[in-house]
Amino acid sequence: MLGIILLVVLALVAGFAVLASRQPDEFRVERSTLIQAPVERVFAQVEDFHQWHQWSPWARRDPAMQVSYEGAAKGVGAVYRWSGNRQVGKGSCAISESRANEWVRMQLEFLEPFQASNVAEFHFQPEAGGTRVSWSMSGRNTFISKAMGLLFSMDKMVGGDFEQGLASLKARAEAAPAQG
């Protein structure tokens, strides 16, 4: 009887491993929103890490999160490091490429609660008197992330965070007084 139970457990583990190994090698999560504000105002909130604590969903999850800034004040070469509770973890984000009022590309390095290296991008497109902002993250799926993907949806987990962040970014940009 114990032998049969062991065989069933091994078959389930092997089946799970096969299913996990067949998951995509890469992932991409993306969300967008229309912000009724000029592209310059929205872009300024993203290219300057000093502004992120005002709209980042992770800053709300850990108000005591430790942050530091390195490199350029904003734009290419700016680096943001964080260390927080279990919900926000520890890592860094560096702006690697940017085109004013069009897009920003960042290299994300997660250290805790798991290690991962991903790319985040923001794209800005003038639309209907405002700015369409798209926020995405892409990266490689390791075997562990493939296995986790069978249990948890990366798109729903991270996508929900992006939706919250974009909603806060929208509220902040729309409430800012017009420049000029």
Image (cartoon, grey):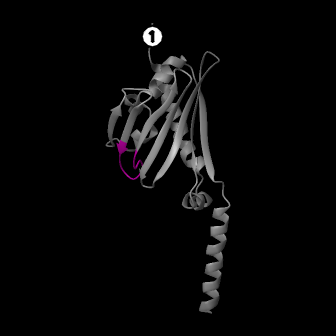
Location of the N terminus by quadrant is bottom right
SS assignment for the magenta stretch, majority? loop
Q: Give whichever of 37, 93 is nearer the camera.
A: 93
Q: Please give the range of residues in magenta.
A: 82-91
Location of the C terminus by quadrant is top left
Does the stretch in magenta take in 97?
Answer: no
Residue 102, percent across and down? Answer: 56, 23
Q: Give whichever of 46, 102 is nearer the camera.
A: 102
Residue 13, percent across and down? Answer: 61, 74
Identity of the residue drawn at 55% across and 31% down: 122
Q: Which residue is mark 1?
A: 179
Residue 15, percent across and down? Answer: 67, 71
Identity of the residue drawn at 48% across and 51% down: 116
Rendered image quadrant of residue 146? bottom right
Residue 114, percent across and down? Answer: 45, 55
Left or right of residue 117: residue 73: left
Left or right of residue 50: residue 160: right
Does the stretch in magenta take in 84?
Answer: yes
Q: Dot 1 lies on which element?
A: loop
